[in-house]
Amino acid sequence: MKLSNELALKINRMELIKMITKAEAKKIKNFLEEFSWLMESYSKVDLTKASKLIDESLDETAAVRKLVGEYESPNPNKQFLIGVLPSLLNDASIFPKNKDIATFAISVLRLNIPQHHKKSKYEIIGHIVCETSNLDEKGLEKLVKALSHIVKDDKKKKKIAERRRQNRFNWNEIIQELST
C-alpha cells in the first residue's frame, strides 16, 4: 500500500513537471529568487507594525468619510450652484464668449462682472462661483430648479444653444420656462 502511494505521488509530480514548460519554470525560478532578495532587503521592516499602521489609517479614513457624509449644507441651493455653475458656464454651446457669461451673471444672478472683457473665462467663472455664496435666498430656488433641468437634460441644453444661435435668447424667459 505504501509503495503504491509513493508511486502515485511520483506519477503526480511527473505529470505536474510535464505541464510546466521550461519557460514557465524559469519564470517561477526568477520570481522566487527576486522575491527572496526583496524579503532579505526588507528584513528589518516590521511588517506587523506596518500592517497595524495601515489598519489605523483605514480607520481614520473611515471616520473622516463618516463625518463628511454627515455634513449637511445649511443652504443646499447655494451648494448646488457652486457645484453646477462651473461646468454649465464652461459649455461653449451656451456661453461661447465671456460677454455671454457676464450677461448671464447680470440678468440671472444680478451679479455685475466688472471689466469682463479683460478677464479670462476662468476668472469670470471663479468670480461668479465665489459670489454665489452671497446671493439672496429669494429666487434662488427657482434658479436652481431651472439650472438642474438644463444640467440633467442634454435636449434642453441643445434647445438653449439653438435659441442662442437664432438670437431668440433671454435668460429670464428661459429660467421662467424651466422653473414652472
Image: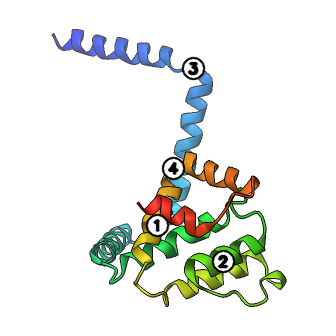
Which of marks 2 and 1 precedes in the sequence? 1
Which of marks 4 and 2 precedes in the sequence? 2
| Quadrant occupied by the C terminus | bottom left
The 10 Å Cα crowd at callout 1, few under 14, some 14 to 19, many 20 or more, is few
Which of marks 3 and 1 precedes in the sequence? 3
Query: Disc 1 designates what residue?
Result: 43
Distance from Cα at disc 2 to Cα at disc 3 = 62 Å
Q: Are marks 2 and 4 in contact (CB under 8 Å)?
A: no
Distance from Cα at disc 1 to Cα at disc 3 = 33 Å
Residue at 43% x, 77% y: name it: 140
Query: Disc 3 designates what residue?
Result: 21
Position of 59 with respect to 26 (left or right) is left
Q: Are marks 1 and 3 in contact (CB under 8 Å)?
A: no
Tell which tag, 2 or 3, sits nearer the viewer.
2
Tell which tag, 1 or 2, sits nearer the viewer.
2
Q: Amino acid at mark 4?
A: Asp
Q: Amino acid at mark 3?
A: Thr
Query: Disc 4 designates what residue?
Result: 153
Per the image, label 2 sits on a secondary structure element best described as helix
The 10 Å Cα crowd at callout 4, few under 14, some 14 to 19, many 20 or more, is few
The 10 Å Cα crowd at callout 2, few under 14, some 14 to 19, many 20 or more, is many
Q: Position of residue 81 (x, y in %)?
A: 49, 73
- Which mark is on residue 117? none
Position of 127 with respect to 41 (left or right) is right
Distance from Cα at disc 4 to Cα at disc 1 = 58 Å
The 10 Å Cα crowd at callout 3, few under 14, some 14 to 19, many 20 or more, is few
Tell which tag, 3 or 4, sits nearer the viewer.
4
Which of marks 3 and 2 precedes in the sequence? 3
